[in-house]
Image (cartoon, rainbow, N blue to C red):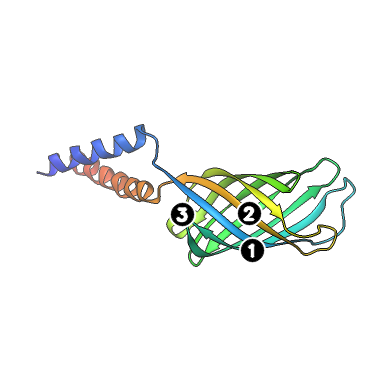
Amino acid sequence: MCSRISRWMLVAVASLLAGPALALTLRFDGTGTVAPTGGPDSAGNLPLIATGSYSFNGIPGWALTSPFSFNPVSGTGTGTFDFSNGPDSLFGSLTTAATVTGFALQYSVLGGTGAFIGVEGSGQSEVFLLGDPNNPPTPFREIGVLSVPEPGTLALLGPGLVGLGFSRRRRAN
């Protein structure tokens, strides 16, 4: 019986490792404000902070904090982001480029907490400025999508690897 369970675990873990992780698509929508946090540096990069309230896949309660710098001459910028909702969060880095109505963002998800512990992924969004950027704080609306591994896939992988380790230890004894 034990050997049958060990083989089953080995097959399950091997299939998880060999196949691509199931992707969870998170569609997000939010509003907030963006404002400078200081004057431009010697290269003309303006430090900004964006904060807002978001929903992920229609579930409200997510908050955004995103410090970044933007260069008005080149129309590009870089920064970090943290989406959080209680114990759950997603964080990482971003790049941004100016558009006619606001910004286009590219997200690199570098980690998370709670249901998203250890995830990595990517995404993109469009930010629409709803006010005069010369009169901060400037209200905005953001619509985007993030793709990260399915939390359930990650949850199965850990216990599977632990079970595989125990089965190998038993065989050695």
- Disc 2 versus disc 3: distance between alpha carbons? 22 Å
Identify the element where label 3 is drawn. helix
Q: Which mark is residue 52?
A: 1
The correct choice, above or below, for 70 with respect to 113 in the image is: above
Which of the image's four quarters has the N terminus?
top left
Identify residue type, mark 1: Gly
Q: Do the residues labelled 2 and 1 touch (CB within 8 Å)?
A: yes
Q: Residue 116 carries which label?
A: 3
- Taking 120 as reference, is 34 left or right? right
Task: Say few, some or many: other residues with alpha carbon within 10 Å of mark 2 (under 14 / 14 to 19 / 20 or more).
Answer: many
- Taking 168 as reference, is 76 left or right? right
Return the disc, 2 or 1, that comes first in the chain's sequence. Answer: 1
Identify the element where label 2 is drawn. strand
Nearer to us: label 2 or label 1: 2
- Expressed as whole percent of the image width and height from the top left, the position of residue 133 reads 81, 57
- Disc 3 versus disc 1: distance between alpha carbons? 20 Å
Which of the image's four quarters has the C terminus?
top left
Query: In this view of the protein, can residue 47 be seen by the observer?
Result: yes
- Expressed as whole percent of the image width and height from the top left, the position of residue 120 reads 51, 45
Identify residue type, mark 3: Phe
Q: Residue 80 carries which label?
A: none
On the image, numbered disc 2 is attached to which residue?
142
- Expressed as whole percent of the image width and height from the top left, the position of residue 153 reads 36, 46
Nearer to us: label 2 or label 3: 2
Task: Say few, some or many: other residues with alpha carbon within 10 Å of mark 3 (under 14 / 14 to 19 / 20 or more).
Answer: many
Return the disc, 3 or 1, that comes first in the chain's sequence. Answer: 1
Identify residue type, mark 2: Glu
The correct choice, above or below, for 161 with respect to 89 in the image is: above
Query: In this view of the protein, can residue 173 be seen by the observer?
Result: no
- Taking 27 as reference, is 173 left or right? left
